[in-house]
Image: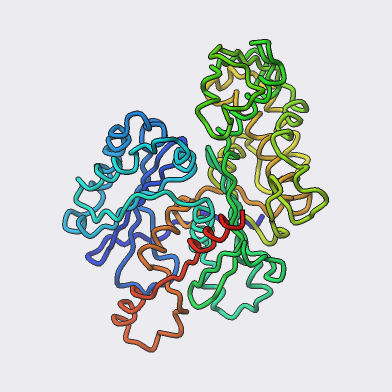
Amino acid sequence: GFCASDMGLGESSGPTALYGMVFDAGSSHTSLFVYQWDSDKENDTGVVSQTLSCDVQGQGISSYANNPPEAGNSLRVCLDKALQVIPVEKQRDVPAYLGATAGMRLLRYSQPPPQVLAEVAKTMQEYPVAFKGAQILTGEEEGAYGWITINYLLDSFTKVGEGWNTHSFATNIFGALDLGGASTQITFMPESSVLRQNEASELTLYGYSYKIYAHSYLCYGQDEMLKRLAKELIVESSPSTRVHHPCYPKGYKETMSLSSFRASPCTDGSDPRLPLGDSTITLEGSGTASACLAALRRLFNSSACGQGQDCALDGGYQPPLRGQFIAFSAFYYNFKFLNLTEGQPLAVVREAIEGLCTRSWKDNPKRLPKYCANANYILTLLLDAYKFNETSWNNICFQMKAGGADVGWTLGYMLNLTNMVPAEAPARVKGLRSSLWAAAITFIILNLVLGLAALLLQLWV
């Protein structure tokens, strides 16, 4: 298939090496990435390498709403590890960022807002790095930065400048599919004629302007989806406290308290259909693939679209798909579990997913119970919501690494905030002496108007 092989990039650890670090504070866990690059190399793509990735122990920072100082403390082990790989004399100049995604987006709705980000910032300021702030990314920013990361690592941006004509150029730019615990993002470059102005994010990278469609759906991440699914099953079988769950394997049981649904905006605790009180419900697996798929489909408000073609989830606008896509994070991990070789036709994938629903959960008690639900959910999301079909399915590559680095929004975020992807094409400024050229590049700003696009989106919605 077209899936790129993961070639590691050469690391630069000499006297001219520079470093940067980004915490990805997701809804279910946090990871730290340390990047390095050579300040002497011309600022072409493919020069940033990933030196370290460190998974923070415990849940995401949003789970510390009632104990914010612990959110900060949770980061210390990874911060210490990062300082071990960065030379002491470089540490004070290392830009350090923390970006939080959908878990913290959901917490925004709680009153009073928890002090989690303030505590995280306090901890990071104790370390000898150039802390640049902790912030919550919008869903559209998260999508766009993931798109930048992929195309940077696969070297798509520089190839554009090598004289591809516009038609072939767009086919060599990859789309990004991201699935987290609380949200999911789709980002790609549609035909410009069909892209609505208020849905476009425009980026100028290496002298070329890209109009991309970046959309994020809150409450459609896999953890929130499982909660929403459980809530619907409970409502349907109320007043019984023993509930059949078609996506969980036979013999598997899980207990939930009704109060857990009241905690998340995604499951809307004020829903009048939810039984009152704080009783405990037992979900009992029946492991039926067809019933699982049907229950998941009911979570998608497909009637919101009417007959419209350019319509995705909950009646939101989506232009027709175009080009090849890299599907990473939970998309990748669930597919890896299916153990299929790349490029399998959809029918084979469907069969493998059905098989998941009937496997004994005792084979892998920690993970297997959720895989039937997750894999069927991914299928529904990609086919029914995002509108992939038998043919375009082959344009999706499930991949977690490219160019020796993890695929995700963190690299694109750092490249943007440190101005490492110039707005101008390298060839145009090559007349300068190389030392001047490197300096000039550093100051060229990437005019990412995502903030504006996100604002327009909010006004539009």
State whether residue 29 appears in this view: yes
- What is the quadrant of the N terminus in the image? bottom right
- Residue at (24%, 44%) from the top-left corner? 122
- The front one of 337 and 29 is 29
Image position, residue 354 (x, y; %): 73, 29
Q: Quadrant of residue 273?
A: top right
- The front one of 149 and 46 is 149
Is 156 drawn above or below residue 401 in the view shown? Answer: below
- Residue at (53%, 39%) from the top-left corner? 182
Is 187 drawn above or below residue 81 in the view shown? Answer: below
Compared across the picture, whether 316 is left or right of 161 comes to: right
- Residue at (60%, 23%) from the top-left corner? 369
Image position, residue 309 (x, y; %): 79, 55
Compared across the picture, whether 14 is left or right of 366 comes to: left
Compared across the picture, whether 282 is left or right of 111 comes to: right
Image position, residue 136 (x, y; %): 42, 48
Image position, residue 267 (x, y; %): 59, 30
State whether residue 352 appears in this view: no
- The front one of 159 and 257 is 257
